[in-house]
Image (cartoon, rainbow, N blue to C red):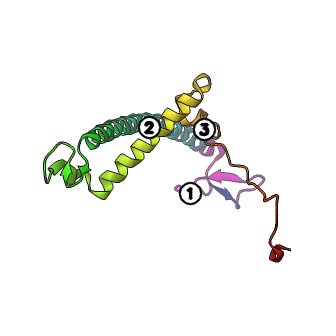
């Protein structure tokens, strides 16, 4: 919005798009302002509709992401169970085959890292659950891991110090 500097008495507000407002009567300015109010109301309604649509899309994508995380966890759990059955024992697989295809597939560093991470997480959750059954919570946000992994007290030597130590 621009302010009309040529207007006597008080400045008239005019929009940037309308270039031919110079010399308009008060009635024309009032009519134009009424039209602009309608335009702004329409723009506000459109913006509110866009916000509602964006929120609903956000909810859909969040649900899809949660479903993908659940599927990933299920697959890693299955791979962990397969890894428990198929692992190298000497020069053979635990299933008894030499050159087991499953061992080779599970030996991929990325797959092995996924399985190790899952197994470590499950072990930690199991330890937390067993250590604090009355304080157990199902979400990581509520878990106090210091109950399972307390910080170690640093022990100071009580007898004999080296001369160089001062």
Q: Give x and y (percent) for residue 143.
A: 59, 34
Check the image and name the residue furthest to the top: 134
**Above or below: residue 136 compared with residue 9:** above
Would residue 139 be seen by someone viewing this image from the given angle? Answer: yes
- The residue singled out by tag 3 in the image is 148
Residue 154 in the image: x percent, y percent? 73, 54
Q: Nearer the viewer, mark 1 or mark 2?
A: 2
Instruction: Using the rendered image of the protein, determine whether residue 48 is visible from the camera's viewpoint.
Output: no
Q: Identify which residue, 8 or 161, lies in the foreground.
A: 161
Q: Earlier in the sequence, mark 2 or mark 3?
A: 2
Q: CA distance from mark 1 to mark 3?
A: 66 Å
Left or right of 162? Residue 61 is left
Instruction: Specify few, some or many for label 2: CA neighbours under 10 Å numbering under 14, 14-19, or 20 or more.
Output: few
Question: In the rendered image, which residue does mark 2 sit on?
Answer: 122
Q: Residue at x 25, y 47 (%)?
A: 87
Residue designated by label 1: 16
């Amino acid at each position: 919005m621009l302010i009309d500097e040529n207007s006597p008495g008080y400045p008239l507000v005019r929009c940037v798009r309308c270039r031919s407002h110079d010399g308009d009567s008060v009635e024309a300015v009032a009519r134009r302002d009424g039209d602009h109010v309608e335009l702004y109301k329409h723009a506000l309604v459109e913006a509110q509709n866009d916000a509602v649509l964006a929120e609903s899309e956000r909810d859909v994508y969040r649900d899809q992401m949660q479903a993908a995380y659940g599927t990933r966890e299920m697959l890693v759990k299955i791979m962990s169970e397969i890894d428990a059955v198929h692992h190298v024992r000497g020069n053979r697989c635990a299933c008894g085959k030499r050159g087991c295809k499953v061992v080779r597939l599970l030996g991929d560093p990325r797959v092995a890292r996924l399985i190790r991470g899952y197994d470590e997480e499950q072990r930690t959750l199991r330890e937390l659950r067993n250590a604090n059954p009355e304080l157990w919570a199902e979400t990581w946000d509520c878990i106090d891991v210091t109950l399972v992994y307390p910080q170690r007290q640093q022990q100071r030597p009580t007898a004999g110090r080296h001369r160089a130590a001062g």
